[in-house]
Image: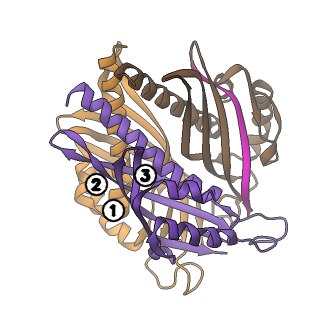
Chain colours: A brown, B orange, C purple
């Protein structure tokens, strides 16, 4: 691998890592236009593996707008990110795959939280794995598909 | 972006990521001189968003010395790190911003922990977001400000 | 540091980070041949600090095969990764050290999970720190030793 290709590969990896982070942040901040903008034009999200919907990013963003209002406090902590870049005979291609693990504490809008009036504890914590497929587009790496596979859920 | 600038940007990002990791480790290991050394000379920490104090890094380090003695077992798990480097028309500048999410399990010093004598369970778990502002200094990237915004807390 | 050395250092760090991620994934997926392949020929794992065994990677892989069958749902979330590369007077050497924090939710095979039939909650969550020592080998970075130090454990 030449230095030029090595550096391009590193830059791709960091850019893809940024997209995954932005994905978590837009969901947790409820910034749905920014969420939708992370997807490629044909991008889709599949949350059926965690009790949610599947569809084009715009439709899913609208579903999330209502759904996440029920959980005003939330975190999507995405770790163990494995990034695989398409390899075109030694050169990075325009497709990438990310597999990552998550834990997601959420607290519903009802008064008092899970454990009493003084507590702001989550009433739901879940964990599982994300699979992302990304495309290199003119403005940068964008999500083509995101799929959630929930492994466990604890409800208070 | 030239290769030289691209590589400098990558090195800056990794160096900043290291500072955030060291921040977590020094707090969890109770290494307060190392904690304080992560800050720029004028560096300040603001923990009022999680029930703590605000002040110059040295003062906050002394407060933490006493405060963290109450919680001999602790973790500050910092993920979803978004690093923004100051952009001087295509060149990285000497200022950076990091926004990151955390979860922090802590166990107090009282006997038996939360759930019984056989258990070492945390009696407090909290989650939230950090905002860091960093300066490039002669010895490397240093924290100018760190601010905590706690989102939730579960007490056993 | 020349650009060539800087780039090599970055590539080493990303490659080592990948090994740590693969370590988590092989354990959580129960892919024991892949787990064992992450180790150098003389590689050893020491899980005595979390109630487990110590020994050559192959023996530990066989122990894990039986042990992890008891916990069909599991996550090893590894964060705060500090990577130290051996420094040979400005050049990266063939040894590296990683210290990282983890949280690990696990659910045992018994029916109904921790909190009832409708729940898939973990019945054990633990947290602690990993120490890895890695060697650069012909096929890439491999684990020479991994040591676990559990800090806390909550059992449902």
User: What residue appears at the point 40 percent right and 72 percent down from the top-left corner?
Assistant: B72
Pointer 2 chain? B
Residue C59 seen from this side: yes
The residue that mark 2 highlights is B35
The residue that mark 3 highlights is C80
The residue that mark 1 highlights is B64
**In this view of the protein, which residue sits in the foreground, A7 or B33?**
A7
Q: CA distance from mark 3 to mark 2?
A: 15 Å
**In this view of the protein, which residue sits in the foreground, B53 or A114?**
A114
Report whether B66 appears left or right of B114: left
Q: CA distance from mark 1 to mark 3?
A: 20 Å
Nearer the viewer's eye, disc 1 or disc 3?
3
Tell me whether circle 1 and circle 3 mark residues in contact (CB < 8 Å): no
Residue C131 seen from this side: no
Pointer 3 chain? C
Residue A129 percent location from the top left of the image: 66, 47
Residue A99 on the magenta segment: no
Q: Is residue C94 above or below residue B119?
A: above
Question: Callout 3: helix, strand or loop?
Answer: strand
Which of the image's four quarters has the N terminus of chain B?
A: top left
Q: CA distance from mark 1 to mark 2?
A: 10 Å
Q: Which residues are magenta?
A: A141-156
Question: Callout 2: helix, strand or loop?
Answer: helix
Neighbor class of circle 2 (other Cα within 10 Å; few <14, some 14-19, many 20+) is many
């Amino acid at each position: 691998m030449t230095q030029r290709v090595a550096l391009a590969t590193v830059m791709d990896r960091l850019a893809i890592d940024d997209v995954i982070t932005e994905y978590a942040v837009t969901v947790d901040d409820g910034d749905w236009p920014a969420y939708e903008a992370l997807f490629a034009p044909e991008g889709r999200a599949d949350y059926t593996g965690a009790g949610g919907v599947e569809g084009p990013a715009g439709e899913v963003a609208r579903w999330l707008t209502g759904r996440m209002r029920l959980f005003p406090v939330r975190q999507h902590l995405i770790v163990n990110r494995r990034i695989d870049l398409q390899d075109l005979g030694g050169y990075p291609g325009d497709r990438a795959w990310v597999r990552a693990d998550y834990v997601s504490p959420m607290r519903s809008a009802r008064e008092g939280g899970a454990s009493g009036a003084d507590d702001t504890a989550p009433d739901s914590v879940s964990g599982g794995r994300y699979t992302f497929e990304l495309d290199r587009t003119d403005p940068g790496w964008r999500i083509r598909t995101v799929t959630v596979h929930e492994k466990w859920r604890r409800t208070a």
